Image (cartoon, rainbow, N blue to C red):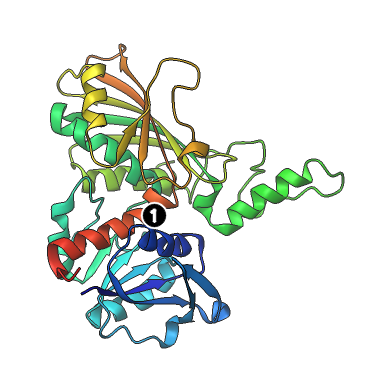
Amino acid sequence: MGYKVVVVGATGNVGREMLNILAEREFPVDEIAALASRKSLGTEVSFGDKTLTTQDLDAFDFAGWDMALFAVGSEATKTYAPKAAAAGCVVIDNSSLYRYDPEIPLIVPEVNPDAIEMYSNKNIIANPNCSTAQMVVALKPLHDRAKIKRVVVSTYQSVSGAGKEGIDELWDQTKGMYVPGQEVAPSKFTKQIAFNVIPHIDVFMDSGDTKEEWKMVAETKKIVDPAIKVTATCVRVPVFVGHSEAVNIEFEDFLDEDEAREILRTAPGILVVDKREDGGYVTPVESVGDFATFISRIRQDVTIENGLNLWCVSDNLRKGAALNAVQIAELLGRRVLKKG
């Protein structure tokens, strides 16, 4: 016996990826519904070898459905997620709306699976920010061994993190650079993204941090350990898919780089590719379409007493969004609903 599953926002990048991953991982689905806004009503989307026609989110009745994977913005989620939850359908939400609610679990299954028990507080589970999700997968096994005091992270985030508009803008600007008179002015981003990097993701806060940077701090504390100090600089780069992070970690206890490498090799969700030679590391292009979080460039930081550096890469549409949501659905099924 399988589950009745709803994918909300099925025509977007993340929604389509959710459908792909549900099919790839052979999630036990008895029935599936693809929902979209009325402007996308009737659009066809793929689910394995099946074609689904999107239904109207506004008119959909969530009663009798087991779980709904939400891949729409916070405003739409604010309207429809409580309706689904009240109807008995467990919501797994990819927006930022519920991440910081203390009564709602924020889950990365490799890191804090026991938090799934909190789902019944509001029948809602939050999916973390894409940049946080891949980082905490790497942090948790190291934290268990040597206890992390502080993390300094610089991100190199692809334009797909800004949705289809971000992808289109990079593509159009890149083409326009080679055609006189066809230059494309910034629209989605604050400055030209083609052949450039932009140290600004989301809105600025009074502290001087952007909200993306604040999210990494708050979410790491909620998922891993509130005692960890985190500081982040988040940068948009001209890459279509795949987020990269340079992570500096300070521990309470000494952790040798070789031991850290072995810990990460055996940790769930991680693939270590770390050879000290040309090409002996993973770049975002190589992460596309993969489930793993890739770790490379593991090395001692000799400038502090107990420090390590590492390079962390993942497909942001997968582990950073759709894959993590499906993994939460799998965890919910195993631990709570127990149908599959």
Residues packed near mark 1 inside 10 Å, few (<14), some (14 to 19) or many (20 plus): many
Residue at image position (19%, 65%) is 333
The x, y position of residue 313, in whole percent, is 42, 36
Callout 1: SS: helix
Coordinates of residue 307 in the picture (x, y in percent)? 26, 19
Quarter containing the N terminus = bottom left
Q: Amino acid at mark 1?
A: Ala
The answer to whether residue 86 is above or below residue 15 is below
Would residue 318 appear left or right of 66 to someone viewing this image?
A: right
Image position of 326 (left or right of 88): right
102 vs 48, nearest the viewer? 48
**Residue at point 57%, 58% (across, down):** 164
What residue is drawn where x is 17% and y is 52%?
Answer: 113
Q: Residue furthest right?
A: 180
Q: Nearer the viewer, residue 6 or 74?
A: 6
Q: Specify the quadrant of the image occupied by residue 152.
A: top left
- Provide the residue designation for mark 1: 321
Q: Quadrant of residue 154?
A: top left
Can residue 101 be seen in the rendering of this structure?
no
Give the position of the C terminus as an image quadrant: bottom left
Horizontal and vertical percent position of residue 72 = 44, 67
Q: Indicate the quadrant where residue 297 lies.
A: top left
In this picture, residue 199 sits left or right of residue 94: right
Residue drawn 78% across and 41% down? Answer: 177
The furthest residue to the top: 302
